[in-house]
Image (cartoon, rainbow, N blue to C red):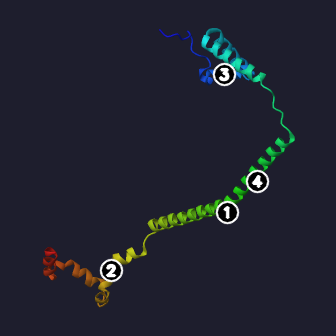
Amino acid sequence: MSHEPDHPDPTADQGSLEEQLVAYLDGELDDQSNRRVEELLATDPRARDTLERLEGTWDLLDSLDRVHVDEVFTKSTLEMVAVAASDDVEQEQAEAPRRRRRWWLAVGAGMLAACAVGFLVVWLLRPNPNDQLLEDLPVLERLDQYRQIDNVEFLELLLANQEELFPEDEEEGDER
């Protein structure tokens, strides 16, 4: 049988046990989280052992000598920060033309794509004026012959008697 507490760890959803205990020792927890950690400490011997170990570490840290920094350390640290900031500014200025160039390329590509889409839409939706010419091509090919006919009545008569007048045309049409 496992040696776990009867209820689940109330701090499990808020990070590791050690993180919760460190926050507890530092006084960083809100009242509700503080109560949960205290309940856990009352019921879980593992949590109490961890807390004692962390308190021992805190005590050792308090016993260390404090390091006092002089003005040279402060000055050198500020100089390092200033140099780092200067490097960041130089890098930003060096990258600015590249970013601008990429932006203009993106704008150009977008414009080109918009033009291509516009051309495609017009090409697909606009009627082709040559379609009517292709439809009328058989008439246009024989336009000289049709001009020799004086009236439409003659054409209607030819159409009505087409089978009798042009029997070989039908046979040629069947062979094709």
Q: Nearer the viewer, residue 70 or 120?
A: 70
Q: Nearer the viewer, residue 79 or 60?
A: 60
Q: Which residue is mark 3?
A: 20
Amino acid identity at mark 2 = Leu
Instruction: From the image, state whether disc 2 or disc 3 is nearer to you.
Output: 3
Which label's residue is closer to the chain start, 4 or 2? 4
Amino acid identity at mark 4 = Ser
Residue at 76% over, 51% down: 83
Q: Residues within 10 Å of mark 3 (few under 14, many from 20)?
A: many
Residue 61: horizontal and vertical position, in percent?
75, 24
Q: Which residue is mark 2?
A: 137
Residue at 33% over, 80% down: 137
Residue 44 drawn above or below residue 27: above
Amino acid identity at mark 1 = Pro
Residue 122 drawn above or below residue 156: above
Circle 3 SS class = helix
Q: Nearer the viewer, residue 5 or 101?
A: 5
Q: Give how far apart the Cα atoms at labels 4 and 2 are.
A: 77 Å
- Residue 149: image quadrant is bottom left
Instruction: From the image, state whether disc 3 or disc 1 is nearer to you.
Output: 3
Q: Which residue is mark 1?
A: 97
Q: Which residue is mark 4?
A: 86
Q: Give how far apart the Cα atoms at labels 2 and 3 are.
A: 90 Å
